Amino acid sequence: MPPKFDPTEVKFVYLRCVGGEVGATSSLAPKIGPLGLSPKKIGDDIAKATSDWKGLKITVQLKIQNRQASISVVPSAASLIIKALKEPPRDRKKVKNIKHSGNITFDDIIAIAKQMRPRSMARQLSGTVKEVLGTAQSVGCTIDNKAAHDVIDEINDGSIEVPED
């Protein structure tokens, strides 16, 4: 016999989904069906919670307690950078392999790094800033009209100061 249901137990489920879209309930069902939740209702709630991340792939955290799910968005560095580029939302099915060739400021990078700080492995904020800059390089955008790796080199040789927290 399965163990008795504990109403105070908190379960966390992490999902990757596209912001602002109702994902396939078939992918939600095996994850949240055993917890006694309706996949369709959760799918609608996720679409509502991720409406300001339209068209971007994003990680969503479901906190499930007493058969109630609360949804929070856990943005990755790449999706934060793409959001900082302020590109218009695109149709995922029609536009493929998009180049994010925009330009963002170093202040944007520091703001993203502060947001990513709790999940970063770096000891100081400068390390987290370098992590975000590496992601910016792979996304393909520039920082203050300079290549991302040049900014990393400038941080390493000390010509750009990163504030401590």
Image (tube, grey):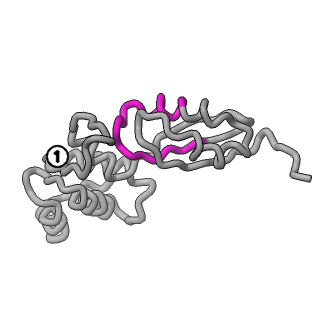
Type of amino acid at the residue the image marks with label 1: Ile
Quadrant in the picture for residue 161: bottom left
Residue 160 lies in magenta, yes or no?
Answer: no
Considering every residue shown, the one lying at the far right of the view is 1
45 lies left or right of 155: right
- Foreground residue among 13 and 123: 13
Residue 137: image quadrant is: bottom left
Residue with the most extreme left position: 145
| Residue 69 picture location, percent across and down | 63, 35
Q: How many marks?
A: 1
For the point 39% across and 54% down, the residue is 117
- Which residue is the site of mark 1? 104
In the structure shown, which secondary structural element does the residue marked by tag 1 occupy?
strand
Categorize mark 1 by other alpha carbons within 10 Å: few (<14), some (14-19), many (20+). Answer: many
Image point 33% across, 60% down: which residue? 128
- Left-right relation of 129 to 106: right
Residue at 21% across, 38% down: 87
Pinpoint residue 143: horizontal percent, then vertical percent. Answer: 14, 52
Which range of residues does the magenta coloring cover? Answer: 44-62
Q: Residue furthest front?
A: 94
Residue 59: say if magenta: yes
Whether residue 144 is situated above or below residue 20 in the rendered picture: below
Residue 93 image offset from top left, x and y in percent: 33, 41
Residue 1: x and y in percent read 92, 53
Q: Is residue 72 above or below residue 148?
A: above
